[in-house]
Amino acid sequence: MIEREATVKISSDLLGNLLGGTKTVSGRLVRVTREGFYELTITLQGGSYTALLPIAATAIVATRPEQEVPSIDVER
């Protein structure tokens, strides 16, 4: 699970349009708004910027892998 203020990789078609083809950037997930946006702080050209990206057009991947959880045997 991505934690609050986690460092993430962000991929968005909107970013591609704004940044001239670059669709993936690094940033921090700040919150998920009620209106359907991810609020992110993204790092571009040495500066930090706040961005609201629509959930439907944005993929967020944590930069740290999840801890492995032992499997549970289920009787079927």
Image (cartoon, rainbow, N blue to C red):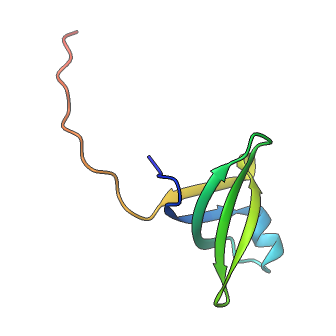
Q: Horizontal and vertical percent for residue 9?
A: 55, 66
> For residue 40, which quarter of the picture?
bottom right
- The answer to whether 6 appears left or right of 38 in the picture is left
> For residue 45, which quarter of the picture?
bottom right
Q: Horizontal and vertical percent for residue 61?
A: 51, 58
> For residue 19, which quarter of the picture?
bottom right
Q: Horizontal and vertical percent for residue 54?
A: 76, 51
Residue at position x 57%, y 56% in the image: 60
The one nearer the camera, 39 or 63, is 39
How many badges with numbers are in the image?
A: 0
Q: Horizontal and vertical percent for residue 11?
A: 64, 63
The one nearer the camera, 19 or 76, is 19
Q: Quarter of the image containing the C terminus? A: top left
The one nearer the camera, 63 or 3, is 3
Q: Is residue 76 above or below residue 70?
A: above
- The answer to whether 4 appears left or right of 30 in the picture is left
Q: Is residue 22 above or below residue 3?
A: below
Residue at position x 21%, y 17% in the image: 74
Q: Is residue 17 above or below residue 54?
A: below
Looking at the image, the residue that sits furthest to the top is 76
Residue at position x 62%, y 58% in the image: 30
